[in-house]
């Protein structure tokens, strides 16, 4: 059976231009014969074009960490879907919790952005959802996920071939060094999937949507997340900043087991 898992690295604001280019070269080399799923890296904006040039001819695709909801105009400091496509992007992260936390990005903005991105068939949105610690502790996680997915996507028309990735990233696990229990992630993925099924129907959800997990995944804990039907891939932060570590994570996901 063809492995269609998705492994995306979010480099956040952690690397200089020179470091991004070095990492892109190392990732390209590591993944040169990789065929175990879809792989992408998301560098900062100033590195996008050059990283994209390095990755040409590689199975590793390019993604952006953010995009604006208008197609062009007087929006100082923003970047449009067409501009990231010009840089070579195939994916774009939308509504990462760090942007929700530090920049007051909300689900109304996320909704508008997804709507615009859906009019660009060559760009796959990676829509982030996930509860914070307080919401989880007080048993509000299921409702929070339901509500975030609803706000992000309700009323949107999903074009026939358009792929949409939902990244479940529990905020309290991001950067903590400890991923959540795989069974808990799997349960959260089910909630997301049931919500999507209610909104778009089973057929659209199975053709167009993938749900992936993010939050402190590394080559040691990844084995718990592989081979689970509801977890269709991973969005990694720290583990994506080292080519060998990223490769080990991707290999584990691709093979459905941990590599020794
Ligand atoms: P970490 O893997 O470093 O926890 O980051 C996850 C993340 O935020 C990916 O978008």
Image (tube, rainbow, N blue to C red):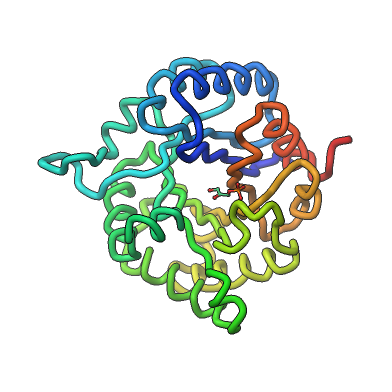
The x, y position of residue 164, in whole percent, is 46, 51
Numbered disc total: 0
| Picture quadrant where residue 53 is located | top left
Q: Is residue 50 above or below residue 227?
A: above
- Rendered-image quadrant of the N terminus: top right
| Picture quadrant where residue 249 is located | top right
Q: Is residue 170 above or below residue 79?
A: below
Residue at 75 percent across and 57 percent down: it is 228
Residue at 67 percent across and 64 percent down: it is 185
The x, y position of residue 118, in whole percent, is 33, 49
Residue at 70 percent across and 62 percent down: it is 180
Q: Is residue 227 left or right of residue 119?
A: right
State the residue in front, 157 or 240: 240
The x, y position of residue 35, in whole percent, is 68, 28
Q: Is residue 219 above or below residue 97?
A: above
State the residue in front, 103 or 214: 103
Q: Is residue 227 left or right of residue 242?
A: right
The answer to whether residue 187 shows anywhere in this view is: yes
Q: Is residue 29 left or right of residue 17?
A: right
In the picture as drawn, the residue positioned furthest to the right comes out as: 260
State the residue in front, 260 or 228: 260
The x, y position of residue 7, in whole percent, is 61, 41
Residue at 46 percent across and 49 percent down: it is 126
């Amino acid at each position: 059976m063809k492995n269609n898992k998705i492994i995306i690295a979010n480099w956040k604001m952690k690397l200089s231009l020179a470091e991004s280019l070095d990492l892109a070269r190392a990732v390209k080399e590591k993944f040169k014969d990789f065929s175990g799923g879809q792989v992408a890296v998301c560098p900062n904006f100033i590195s996008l074009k050059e990283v994209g040039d390095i990755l040409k001819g590689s199975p590793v695709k390019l993604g952006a960490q953010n995009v604006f909801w208008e197609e062009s105009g007087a929006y100082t400091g923003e970047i449009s879907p067409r501009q990231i496509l010009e840089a070579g992007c195939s994916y774009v992260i939308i509504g990462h919790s760090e942007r929700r936390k530090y920049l007051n990005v909300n689900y109304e903005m996320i909704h508008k952005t997804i709507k615009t991105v859906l009019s660009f068939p060559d760009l796959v949105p990676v829509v982030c959802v996930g509860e914070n610690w307080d919401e989880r502790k007080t048993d509000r996680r299921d409702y929070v996920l339901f509500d975030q997915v609803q706000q992000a996507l309700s009323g949107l028309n999903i074009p026939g071939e358009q792929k949409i990735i939902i990244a479940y990233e529990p905020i309290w696990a991001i950067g903590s060094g400890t991923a959540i229990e795989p069974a808990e992630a799997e349960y959260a993925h089910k909630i997301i999937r049931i919500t999507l099924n209610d909104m778009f129907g089973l057929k659209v959800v199975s053709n167009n949507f993938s749900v992936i997990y993010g939050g402190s995944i590394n080559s040691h804990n990844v084995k718990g997340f592989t081979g689970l039907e509801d977890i269709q891939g991973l969005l990694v932060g720290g583990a994506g900043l080292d080519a060998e570590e990223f490769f080990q994570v991707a290999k584990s996901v691709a093979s459905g087991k941990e590599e020794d």
